[in-house]
Amino acid sequence: MIVCKTKQELKQALASRNAQETIGFVPTMGALHEGHASLFKRARAENDVFVASVFVNPIQFNNPEDLKNYPRDFEADRKLLEENGCDIVFAPSVEEMYPEGEPLKSYSFGALETVMEGAQRPGHFKGVGVVVGLLFELVRPDRAYFGEKDFQQVAVIQDLVRQMGIKTRIVPCPIKRGEDGLALSSRNALLTPENRALAPKIHAALKKSSEMANRSCREVKEFVCGQIAAVPEMKLEYFEIARPDTLQTVPDEAPAQGNVGFIVVWMGKVRLIDNIRY
């Protein structure tokens, strides 16, 4: 596996490959786990060359404390990437990605970035668009793999590809969960043992609510909010039922069927996200 710290090293590593070979790409912020590994396995299986990036992108964090606390362990990340057949990993510094004085391309995602995560974390998706756009320009992947735990991000990235006018195919991958149902996340490592034991109740509430898919969104919302409120250690930030294509909220009177439930729950200082298709 080739480790590239600079854009020039990455270009050289990619140039040494056969131009006819397909490139599968998985951009990450490190703190890799089995959820990432499921993306790596697909990228490895479906392409001739598997490229990954490890970069904690500061401009997508609107909370300085969250950026400071984000887990980092490059040696562990390198090991997991090697075990999953990564050919090239790009692990730049902030200064390498964003040289001082160099203008950055900016993208607007319209209604996709003004709801849910976009509303709660202003500027987040603009930061995601900037870094993923840069990475796509550098790697020029045939396919790029993203987990559906960040469902809204996948929609934003698909719109980014459209705006960039590139042929990269975005491959959404199912949420990877622990045996207890908790969606795997780098942030899970920050949970206290007590909160980690309670966190699976988030998915349990969503899963139970899926049995109510033919009922109104209002009823489903009331059920899920009630389930979370029953756990004192949990603080609900939002639970929305939205259309999978536009991410716009479905009217309360309409059935939940065919839409997606999006949830964010705080446990202590840890912010957990999840979603479910109805």
Image (cartoon, grey):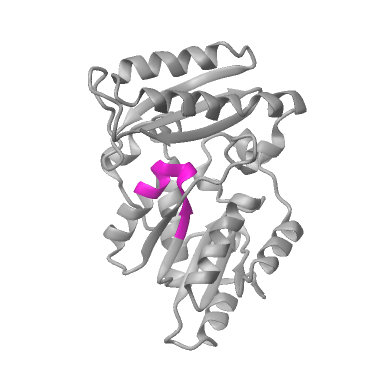
Q: Which residues are magenta?
A: 145-155
Q: Position of residue 163 (x, y in %)?
A: 27, 58
Q: Position of residue 233 (x, y in %)?
A: 64, 16
Q: Position of residue 41 (x, y in %)?
A: 57, 64
Q: Quadrant of residue 267?
A: top right
Q: Position of residue 131 (x, y in %)?
A: 47, 56
Q: Quadrant of residue 262?
A: top left
Q: Is residue 109 above or below residue 262?
A: below
In this orientation, which residue lies closer to the viewer: 58 or 205? 205
Q: Is residue 15 above or below residue 237?
A: below
Quadrant of the rendering where the N terminus is positioned? bottom right
Quadrant of the rendering where the C terminus is positioned? top left
Q: Residue at x 76, y 28 (%)?
A: 193
Q: Residue at x 60, y 18 (%)?
A: 234
Q: Residue at x 51, y 19 (%)?
A: 236
Please indicate, yes or no, whether residue 62 appears anywhere in the rendered image: yes
Q: Main secondary structure of the magenta part?
A: helix
User: In the shown orientation, is residue 91 left or right of residue 142?
Assistant: right
Please indicate, yes or no, whether residue 99 appears anywhere in the rendered image: no
Q: Is residue 141 above or below residue 179?
A: below
Q: Residue at x 67, y 40 (%)?
A: 68
